Image (cartoon, coloured by chain):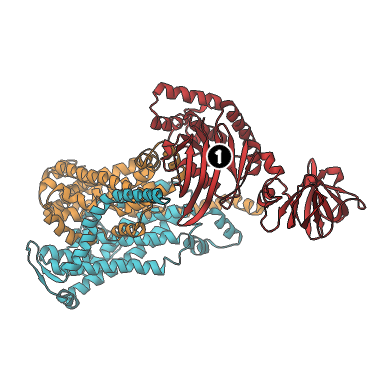
Amino acid sequence: MADVVLQGVSKAYAGRPTVHAVDLTVADKEFMVLVGPSGCGKSTTLRMIAGLEDITSGRLLIDGADVTHAQPQKRDIAMVFQSYALYPHMTAYRNMAFGLLKTTRLGKVEVDRRIREAAEILHISHLLERRPNELSGGERQRVAIGRALVRQPKVFLFDEPLSNLDAKLRSRMRGELKRLHSELGLTVIYVTHDQIEAMTLGSRVAILSEGRLQQVGAPMELYMRPANTFVATFIGTPEMSLLRCAVKPEGEGSLVQHERFSATLPMRAGHADAFLGVRPEEVRVSRPGEGLTRGIVERTELIGAEALAEILIGTDRVVARMPVPEAPDSGAEVSVFFDLARARLFDAATGRALPAA
Amino acid sequence: MPFGAPFQVRLREAGLAYLLLLPSLVFLAAFTYWPILRSVWFSFHDVVLGDSRIIWLGLENYQRLWDDRLFWKALGNTVFYTVITIPVAIVCALLMAVALDSKLRGMAIYRSAFFYPVMIPSVAAGMVWVFLYSAGYGPINQGLRLIGLPDTAWLYDSSWALPAIMVMSVWKYSGYFMLILLAALKLVPSDLYEAARLDGVSAFDRLIHITLPLISPTLYFVAIIGLLHSYQIFDYVYVMTHGGPADATNVLTFYIYQNGFQYQDIGYASTLANVLLLFVGGLIAVMATVFGRRVHYLGR
Amino acid sequence: MTSLRTEIASRPAIVALRRGWLHVVLVPLALLWLSPLVWILVTSLKARTEVFDPAAGFWPQVLRWENYPAALSVAPFGTYLVNSILVTGGILAAQLVTITLAAYAFARLTFPGKNLLFTLFLLQIMFPIYATFLTNFVTVRELGLLNSLPAMIVPFVASGYGTFMLRQAFRQVPTELADAARLDGCGHVGILWHVYLPLVKPTLIAFGIITVVTHWNDYMWPLLVTNSEAVRTLPIGLGLLAKSDSGADWTRLMAATVVVVSPLLVLFVVFQRRFVDSFMHAGLK
């Protein structure tokens, strides 16, 4: 059992707050991803959990114990850094043994057993006597993970560990990390700016922006039911289109009035100025004449298996995704449908999803 | 106490920092700051070496300094030595460095040949040059005789003694400056030269308009090093001429030594030392304002 | 672009000529620079009369190796050598400790007055012992250290220059390594010892070489604070020999000079790369 609980954890540098009262619970054996654009405070939050930054206010519990002000080595955590942070003057073996010998009273035999075991799991047994500069990027990455594994900590912290790898290696290591997590039953907190990494790796994902927690949830939950416009546009590529409209109740649902069309949504959202959010795959395009409304195709991009079309509807733009043969030409006038059962509304003033949960 | 713990952490860190600095600071205080303060204090007093009595003199030492012809001569010699030797050595070093900044055969040998004087103790260097400069049997005079020039007793001639020491200084330090400049030249991106070559810029113009501006921070740094090494002129004066002939090679450091150690007049020697501190400090300040702002930093 | 490449490639003769021309300038210059050393060696093997005889020619008629034992017997050079080693070694050891501690504080800790203190450290570079020897002499005298080995060591225990150099090197060490070491259970001392020091070894060696060269050769300060054979260093001994001989016996003097300069020159020749790199990069980082 090793859960991590953040209670109103805040960080301020020289009086300027950078992380605002984050409340987050990471359950045992969970793979929690902290994701957000650069400067959103995700790395700072991770470093506070690690004990590398002190916590300005709030409480941090690991496995029920208050470690808010504990030294890093007393927290029973291990961390994998973006640049791997392997000691250049030590072999891979020494890199893995160093912290183990420093933080535990394990005998040489047990240390050796753990290192061999971790090396086996990570397929780096043949690299143990090499120094970091004799290893490739992917191999360094494995050694860095190995250094964390041998510690057998309660919690693993990853700080953008894949961002220094090339695209191919990155996707391989992603699969590897997923395998390690499920096979070994690790509790992981993982920081990344890459939403695809977040969606594929996380059992749950926490989205941060400007030092505030925006939403926490399973990847698909975030994708389908974003809590606000930030989450809505941050998750998913191309991003969700937002159309300005007015909303008022009508029967059991709501009437949405856009400058070019109006439609009924099967949910009650009260009176509001709002954004109608539709994802590219929720937009359907056909010949003029039918459809909810009409638009002008500004641009089409063929990206292999599918095509993306940017369509101007009044003053708003929506992006539609479709099979390549169905892609309209630029400049064409087309009819547009939305999958209104999946569409969502956001309050135009606050950005929050409607109806408020 | 929301701010309690971080504050304590900062306090502990500051405490540790001061603890780490303490050993250095104790010795810096005793042998750098205290001597400077003390020499200011002494300059207002009559202090005799080995005598514990100190008599307040006010500005008398400074008055004496103002009227002291020998002080002005020593100051003039110091200025002359500094402002000629450093630029000449730097120009020599620059030419050596530019010549060696190519994949030249025997590069390591040339480099060592120019650099080895730095390894030689100043006293040994001074002595050897006394021999080289000596009248009659000295190799330099023998060489001059071969081309029909008259003998000169270089170190005993009041118009040649100081220039003779300066020539030796150039020999001793150019190699050091060359090495530093060579390191800087290696950092100049070669595509800049290639671009200039495509534009048809001549080798000389490349040196003036590309190389020099780009290594100007290093030139500035070398000038500072040169200035700090010019303190060592004391060794050469002490070994080669003892300030003579007729104080032609008497420089500030040597004059301080004479007053303090030969005449035991610590008060007046301190006054001179203050002038030396002001001279060096002032020169560094001037260099910093004149050159410091105009240097181009390579990507930094 | 291609046309320029071929043009350059098709003119190896011109390149060779330019290189050759460089050698024409560099060879005489290098010889000029080497000539004092040559004269030291040649003179140290001559007979005394040969030195003063303009007709005797450049090379000694007989190689007089006996000049060397003769030179070494005039003064206790063995004692001088031991003293030089003790003084230089003492300074080096003390400096490595003080600069490591101070540089770590300046590179990696935050504390009030950091900039002011750093400026104070740099002040020592501007005002070395050559500028403050007078009042330093008074201090050392008051401390009762005159004419002792510590007198030649204590003024140099702290080094603003070394602190500066090492601080620059420490700052090149990625902070993530220090973070990793903290997670691996290291405190500040552990980080310094296990991570920083091994990684800045080249800088430590460079600083060590510069310190050794400086203090092995130092003349003025040892001259001022010593007055007995028991504590003199090699350069002082050589200076004394020069004074007593006053130019009368150049052969003996040059033999002694060879003895004094050779330890460093031999080290220089053997570890040429190390020495050159040390001096080359000492101030650039």
Disc 1 on helix, strand or loop?
Answer: strand
Figure check: B268 above or below B50 = below
- Residue B204 drawn at (x, y percent): 50, 63
Please give the name of the residue rendered at 36% of the width and 59% of the height, measured from the top-left corner: C115
Residue C139 shown left or right of residue A31 in the figure: left
Nearer-the-camera pick, B227 or C127:
C127
Chain letter matching colour red: A
- Residue A197 drawn at (x, y percent): 63, 40
Per the rendering, the colour in which chain C appears is: orange
Judged from this view, the residue extending furthest toward the right is A289
Q: Count the marks.
A: 1
Please give the name of the residue rendered at 48% of the width and 48% of the height, measured from the top-left corner: B103
Nearer-the-camera pick, A39 or C193:
A39
Figure check: A102 above or below B291 = above
Figure check: A7 above or below C32 = above
- Residue A339 drawn at (x, y percent): 81, 46
State which quadrant residue A191 falls in. Answer: top right
Subunit bearing disc 1: A
Residue C209 shown left or right of residue A195 in the figure: left
Q: Is residue C128 visible?
A: yes
Q: Which amino acid lies under the numbered mark 1 shown in the image of this protein?
A: Thr
Q: Which residue is mark 1?
A: A25
Chain letter matching colour cyan: B
Please give the name of the residue rendered at 11% of the width and 47% of the height, measured from the top-left corner: C229
- Residue A171 drawn at (x, y percent): 64, 36
